[in-house]
Amino acid sequence: MWKRMIVMLVVVFSCIAGIGYAKKVMVMKAIEAHKNFAMPPVAVTTLVVKGQKWQPVLSAVGSLRAVNGVTVSTDLAGIVSEINFESGAAVKKGASLIQLDTQQEEAQLHAAEAKLEWTKVDMDRKRDLVAKKTISPSDWDSAQSEYRQAVANVDTAKAVIARKHIVAPFDGYLGIRQVNLGQYLNPGASIVPLQSLDPIYVEFNLPQQDLGQLAVGKKLRLRAADIEGEFEGEINAIDSRVDDATRNVMVQGTARNPDHKLRPGMYVNVDVLLPEKDSVLAIPVSSVNYAPYGDSVYVVKPAADGKPGLEVEQHVVKLGPARGDQVSVLSGIQDGDEVVTSGGFKLRPHAAVQVNNAVTPDNSLTPKPNDT
């Protein structure tokens, strides 16, 4: 019995040793295969970085305001007897807009003129009489005073009549008419908006740290949504104080608007043009891997250790201002580096890559995205 047990144990241990040896051979083969395994190259697009001229700007969102803009109104009550304009029309300074009824004022003018004629006759008569010493000089003084008072009454009546004839105070474009024929108007009642359109003011806010770069006369560039082209202008005033709540300073500029495409009340994107920089390294925004510990890009290099193909190095970069689809790089890359522009999310340092620039991401300083 002991012999059979020993034989059985020998057989069991031999089986275990054989299984262990087989597993060891499999593991060694797997290790060897893993050593020789290489991930396939990742397809990426690239861009060779080159220094370029850049126009640095300070960007903001501004509001447009008319250089001259009012809502025409009346300072006297009255009934509208004439309307001499059409809504939306262009008018010149002094153009007739509306006429209020002046029948009562004209009657008062006639009475004042009649009184003026009588006082003039009386004054002329007393001039002769005082020369003959028939009346006292005080009577002559009273006659002169009554005459001057009559002249003033006539002027007052004419002024009231003139004030009931509402005219355009400056050249501009009218808005929508807000009165009707025969309507009674109270003092201050709105008649029609009137705005001058060329030139036009743009007002915007910038942070206080940009105040040192602002100056009267600096050029502006304006863009408005759904309006093609850009509009040029310049700064004409900078507010004398910084808002203590927002720490922003108000800036006012004047822009040329010859085609009257810009209208008061619109918002526009405003760029304050700063002196050009001769050499700026700019890359597409899609190249940057943003992270809390630092932004980075992948730069394509020949594979190390004489291996064929290409691989990538990860470079931490310091970013500067952005424009359109591009962002400037202050440090971390050099002129001539080939930077990965798409596919970077699949990469790791020293990963093999294959460059395919058949389709590349947008890289425009003035992108025009399709909203449809």
Image: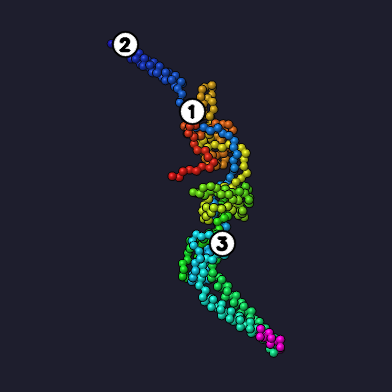
Q: Earlier in the sequence, mark 2 or mark 1?
A: 2
Which quadrant of the view contains residue 124? bottom right
Left or right of 38? Residue 16 is left
Residue at the location (71% across, 86% down)?
A: 131
Q: Disc 2 and disc 1: Cα gap in Å?
A: 62 Å
- Whichever of callouts 1 and 3 sits on the residue coming sooner in the sequence is 3
Magenta residue span? 124-133
From the viewer's side, name the closer residue of 196 and 239: 196
In the image, residue 143 above or below residue 288: below
Q: Nearer the viewer, residue 354 or 132?
A: 132
| Circle on res. 7 | 2
Q: Main secondary structure of the magenta part?
A: helix
Q: Which residue is mark 3?
A: 92
Task: Judge left or right: residue 178 versus residue 319.
Answer: left
- Label 2 sits on a secondary structure element that is helix
Characterize the local packing of mark 1: few (<14), some (14-19) or many (20 or more) Cα atoms within 10 angstroms.
Answer: some
* Spatial separation of the CA atoms under disc 3 and disc 2: 123 Å
Q: Are marks 2 and 1 in contact (CB under 8 Å)?
A: no
Q: In this picture, is 199 found above or below 353? A: below
Pick out the residue farthest to the left: 1
Q: Quadrant of the C terminus?
A: top left
Marks 1 and 3, how far apart in space? 68 Å
Disc 3 crowd, CA 10 A, few/some/many (<14, 14-19, 20+): few
Q: Pinpoint residue 240: horizontal percent, then vertical percent.
A: 62, 55
Contact, mark 1 vs mark 3 (Cβ under 8 Å): no
**Quadrant in the picture for the N terminus:** top left
Residue identified by numbered label 1 = 354
Name the colour scheme.
rainbow
Q: Which mark is residue 68?
A: none
